[in-house]
Amino acid sequence: MKMKAIRVRQFGGPEVLVLEEVDVPELGEKQVLVRVHAAGVNPADTYARSGGGSAKPELPYTPGSDAAGVVEAVSPGVLHVKPGDRVYTARTISGAYAELALASAKQVHPLPERVSFEQGAGLYVPYGTAYRALRQIAHVRAGESALVHGASGGVGIAALQFGRAMGLTLLGTAGSEKGRELAKREGAHHVFDHHDPKYRDAILAATNGRGVDVILEMLADVNLGHDLQMLAPRGRVVVIGSRGDVTLTPRDLMTRDASIHGMLLWNVPEVDEIEIHAVLATGLEEGVLRPVVGKELPLAEAARAHREILEPGAYGKIVLIP
């Protein structure tokens, strides 16, 4: 049996993403085959494709960790899902940019009826990252304040929705008027244009000069040094994304008893991952979590998706439709 899938045969720019006809992956022990209705595109996919990610995939490979669709088949012993069930994936074995994706049983989770496949494709990486950053890394408490950089992107929207549910005062940055309106709609109490040279002063003014308790940083090489000057006493910065080196002034940390935490979702311990999926299930069922799909593109346009996800002015998730 054959299927269509995006293949990467050499590391490089978006042009190395090529739609090919390949063999359907065969089920192994405790595995699930999912017919993909939508695949989520994440910045991490672009880093892996370029060969500059934290771990280089073995060539050739099919990109993608986040998908949503219907179970096609399961191997014996898989009991929590069955053929015909709606599911989302949290990583895959064979790659999500394809008509069919093979995953281990632990990587497949039920998708509530109220959540579309397109929304389901924007679940694990954005929402898992946001929850881990806020609760498991920064240990936020109700009543604290959080600044979410890139608040109109996938992780940013997830952080706003979680933050509202956690009782936080939320500040967000976005680079377009459309993005700032989205951030307000999804829970930000204050929104700032990061193109404004005085936006950091405005953030401090919004906190009456105290600073923010937690900052979620998506572009540390640009913002981290400035972030430290916006922290409240005992503030925490969680670095979620960075594309280069940065120079810091340690005294900005020392005077505040502040801290910087790095995180990578792939490092999550199993016990924490179980917690993340339990929280996602409840949040989706109750409508607290509402993934926003900004753009749907055909699978064949994966290269365009990889270009656009790194452009300024993020607005929701980009998903690929096989």
Image: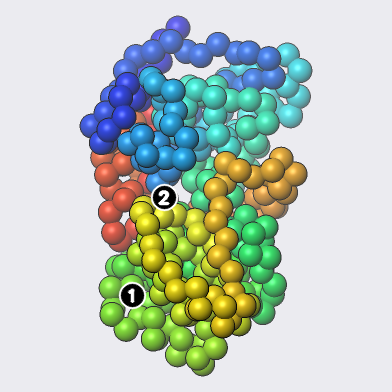
Q: What residue type is labelled 1?
A: Asp
Seen in the picture, residue 267 relative to 194 is either above or below; the reply is: above
Residue 138 in view (yes/no): yes
Please provide percent x and percent y for residue 204.
Answer: 46, 86
Q: How is the image coloured?
A: rainbow
Q: Which residue lies furthest to the top in this view?
A: 1
Q: Do the residues labelled 2 and 1 touch (CB within 8 Å)?
A: no
Please provide percent x and percent y for residue 255.
Answer: 56, 83
Disc with the residue nearer the chain's start (2 vs 1):
1
Q: In which quarter of the image is the C terminus?
A: top left
Quick one: SS at disc 2? strand
| Image quadrant in which you'd find residue 13 | top left
Left or right: 322 with respect to 32? left
Q: Circle 1: is it few (<14), some (14-19), or many (20+) Cα within 10 Å?
A: some
The structure residue drawn at horizontal position 34% and vertical position 25%, both measured from the top left corner, is: 8
The structure residue drawn at horizontal position 71% and vertical position 47%, both measured from the top left corner, is: 272
The structure residue drawn at horizontal position 65% and vertical position 36%, both measured from the top left corner, is: 109
- Nearer the observer, 177 or 90: 90
The structure residue drawn at horizontal position 64% and vertical position 59%, both measured from the top left corner, is: 137
Q: Circle 2: is it few (<14), some (14-19), or many (20+) Cα within 10 Å?
A: many
Please provide percent x and percent y for residue 302.
Answer: 31, 35
Residue 300 in view (yes/no): no
| The label number, if any, that marks residue 62 in the structure image | none
Q: Mark 2 points at which residue?
A: 317
Quick one: SS at disc 1? strand
| The label number, if any, that marks residue 193 in the structure image | 1
- Nearer the observer, 198 or 53: 53
